Image (cartoon, rainbow, N blue to C red):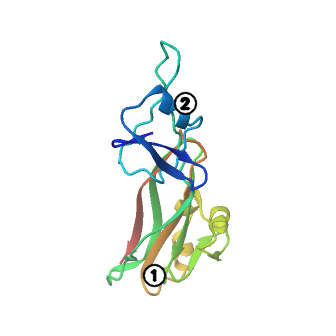
Amino acid sequence: MVDGNDIKHWDTASLSYVKVSELPLTADKFQSYGDDNYRKERTGLISASPILKIWSPLPEMPVPVVTQTIKPKPVIVSMKEDILFTEAYIVDIVNAVISLDNTGSGIIVFIVSTDSGVSWKAWNGSSWVLMDITNMEDVKIKGMTVSVLQGITEAQWTSLGLLNKKIRFAWYMEITSSTDILKLKEIRVNYNTM
């Protein structure tokens, strides 16, 4: 690995790239310090753009291609602030509408809070149940799908207990393939007014 003017290789004892020489590269340096495997870790590298160098005794070598596929870990995203509907003319929530791009096998489910994120709930088809936002698997399994969230009626929203006239959303997102696309564009809350 060329890191600025330094030639480095992976040191298994320190689990980092260590300097073995300075440029220029030679066949002897490759044979003495060359690594058989490329390491994804950057420990020991200083340059923002280190260069992976490959050597072969063959007079012509095909251009090497390094492919790195990254799949994000599942995540729970929580709104930082409440949606307030404290105006006197707003009676209650009529429904929620979700706009998203979901191509592939991405998973997104929602939970809601009416106390600024102290406690969280999900509609299970017959009642609001408490959720543990710190338990990712609990949210994934018991959270509300887009169709469930959008299907909650005005009466069911009212049964959530909206006396403080505020609500906050959180959602679990997971993709299972590097080709999945999962983007939440908008959560729109429609209100009933007098």
Could you tell me which quadrant the C terminus lies in?
Answer: bottom left
Q: Residues within 10 Å of mark 2 (few under 14, many from 20)?
A: few
At which x and y percent is residue 2?
A: 40, 39
Amino acid tagged 2: Gln
Could you tell me which quadrant the N terminus lies in?
Answer: top left
Earlier along the polypeptide chain: callout 2 or callout 1?
A: 2
Is there any visible trace of residue 66 in the rendered image?
A: no
Image point (62%, 75%), residue name: 132
At which x and y percent is residue 138?
A: 67, 68
| Front position in the image: 2 or 24 | 24
Q: Is residue 169 left or right of residue 159?
A: left
Residue 31 tag number = 2
**Disc 1, SS:** loop
Q: Is residue 179 left or right of residue 49?
A: right
Residue found farthest to the top: 59
Image point (48%, 12%), residue name: 59
Image point (56%, 81%), residue name: 119
Residue picked out by circle 1: 116
